[in-house]
Image (tube, rainbow, N blue to C red):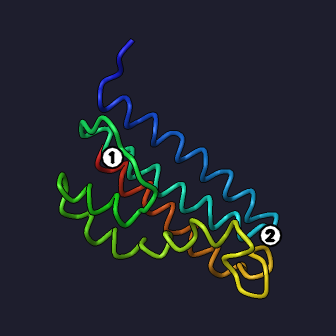
Amino acid sequence: MKRSSKEEGLRWLEQSEADLIGAQVLFDNRVYHLACFIAQQVAEKAIKAFLYAHGEKIVTGHSVTSLATWAEQFEADFAALRDEVAILDGYYIPTRYPNGIPDSIPAKVYTRKPAEEALRLAEKTIEFVRQRL
């Protein structure tokens, strides 16, 4: 059974929302580095949801900045979102690998404050996309 573009977009948005719950669990358990990483994933999947819903067949890449720029082709308001959530791209690799942090590890470097902001931005991205689907 072939899904419509909108159905595919809604599937991606649903997964993004489920991942946000996981990010909150990590945050609540003070696993801030992974909460930051999952927040980036949440925003990535939400923007991909928008792109799939607008008929894109193959949506590749992990950068929320690049994905939001792509989404601007369909909705100019993504430019403002892109500028606000761009910081999430910085949580894609260094939050997971010790070689991304000189003389420490991600589990020690990422703290409550950046994780709170990352979750806020992930939620904002979901809401932004939800309003446009």
- Outermost residue on the front side: it is 99
63 over 90 or under it: above or below: above
Q: Position of residue 52 (x, y in %)?
A: 32, 39
Q: Which residue is tagged 1?
A: 50
Residue at x 52% of width, y 47% of height: 16
- In this rendered view, identify the residue nearer to me: 41 or 130: 41
Q: Residues within 10 Å of mark 2 (few under 14, many from 20)?
A: some
- Labels in figure, total: 2
Q: Residues within 10 Å of mark 1 (few under 14, many from 20)?
A: many
Label 2 vs label 1: CA separation? 31 Å
Quadrant of the drawing holding the C terminus:
top left
What's the residue type where badge 2 is placed? Arg
Q: Which residue is tagged 2?
A: 30
Q: Position of residue 71 (x, y in %)?
A: 26, 55
Left or right of residue 29: residue 53? left
Left or right of residue 129: residue 37? right
Q: Secondary structure at mark 1?
A: helix
Residue at x 46% of width, y 39% of height: 12
CB under 8 Å between callouts 2 and 1?
A: no
Q: Position of residue 17 (x, y in %)?
A: 54, 47
Residue at x 46% of width, y 57% of height: 62
Q: Position of residue 2 (x, y in %)?
A: 35, 16
Q: Which badge, 2 or 1, comes first in the chain's sequence?
A: 2
- Outermost residue on the bottom side: it is 103
What's the residue type where badge 1 is placed? Phe
68 over 49 or under it: above or below: below
Say which quarter of the image contains residue 10. Answer: top left
